[in-house]
Image (cartoon, grey):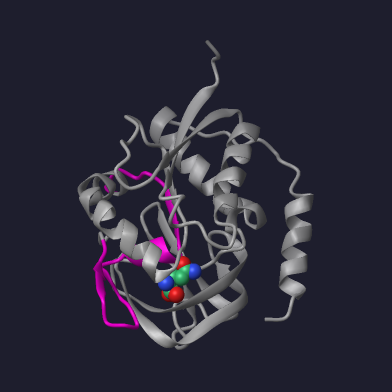
Amino acid sequence: MSDERELVIVSLYPRDMNIYGDRGNVLALERRARAHGFAPRVVETNPGDAWPETVDIVIGGGGQDSGQGRVAADLRARGDALRELAAEGTPMLMICGLYQLFGHRFLTHEGTELTGIGVLDVETRGGSERLIGNIVIESDEFGEIIGFENHSGDTVLGPGSRPLGRVIQGAGNNARDGVEGARTGNVIGSYLHGSLLPKNPAISDFLIGAAARRRYGSFTPVAIDDSTANRARAAAKRRPR
Ligand code: GLN
């Protein structure tokens, strides 16, 4: 048996919630975890699938309103388990459609209410304006975060979540507040596709570090060559919106 330390990454609803390359987040995280000396194991969980016994990181992507409708009931059924994992400090990254469903509710443009699981203190309404384009935000913890947004959901934060970052270029949670994403404990919600993690290794390191500390009590990061990620960041930043 290898003495490598395992990290179990649950990929939530890859069949329905995986748009604009969000699967790239799972691939980037897997590769990054390996580079830091861990043995990542990805468990894809679609509606009805059993969960693994140990969960170290949970990753979820975006999708159309219809995809959100297909997973919402299954997500609610796992609500207690996910709220418990979040309260214990399990790191999670939820993009766009699942960011919305990790909040309290998503009211679609057509007036359908999808009840979320309230891990994040946010609420979303489908708007008439679509917010599309490359986006740059600034976060105290992660520095500049670069991605691509495409949503009509208008998200508002409550006091139980703080923004992931301040918007430098683009829209973010809505067209008014100048902030993007939500953070409660080690759970991050964000509209940034792109994929997000290949271009923002600082967030991968945060997820891996939090998971490693929780499961093994420590995390000693390995120096990794980020020159390719840095070139991708520079190219995305130069692109017009
Ligand atoms: N349906 C949601 C919206 O448009 C989510 C979109 C997405 O995940 N890209 O707001």
On the image, the x and y values in percent for residue 227 come to 79, 51
Q: Quadrant of the C terminus?
A: bottom right
On the image, the x and y values in percent for residue 28 come to 61, 46
Left or right for 176, reference 89? right
Q: Examine the rendered structure and indicate whether residue 25 appears above or below residue 211.
A: below
Q: Examine the rendered structure and indicate whether residue 232 appears above or below residue 236.
A: above
Name the foreground residue: 35 vs 125: 125
Asked if the magenta segment contains residue 43, the reply would be: no
Left or right for 99, reference 206? left
Give the image quadrant in which the ligand numbered 1 is located.
bottom left
Left or right for 212, reference 232? left
Name the foreground residue: 43 vs 6: 43
Name the foreground residue: 172 vs 27: 27
Residue at image location 46% in from the left, 62% down from the top: 62
Residue at image location 50% in from the left, 84% down from the top: 130
Q: Which residues are magenta?
A: 87-116
On the image, the x and y values in percent for residue 19 come to 53, 61
Q: Is residue 163 visible?
A: no
Q: Examine the rendered structure and indicate whether residue 16 appears above or below residue 4.
A: below
Q: Examine the rendered structure and indicate whether residue 87 appears above or below residue 19.
A: above
What is the quadrant of residue 71 in the picture? Answer: bottom left
Q: Is residue 89 visible?
A: yes
Residue at image location 30% in from the left, 65% down from the top: 103
On the image, the x and y values in percent for residue 101 come to 33, 63
Residue at image location 59% in from the left, 57% down from the top: 21
Name the foreground residue: 215 vs 95: 95
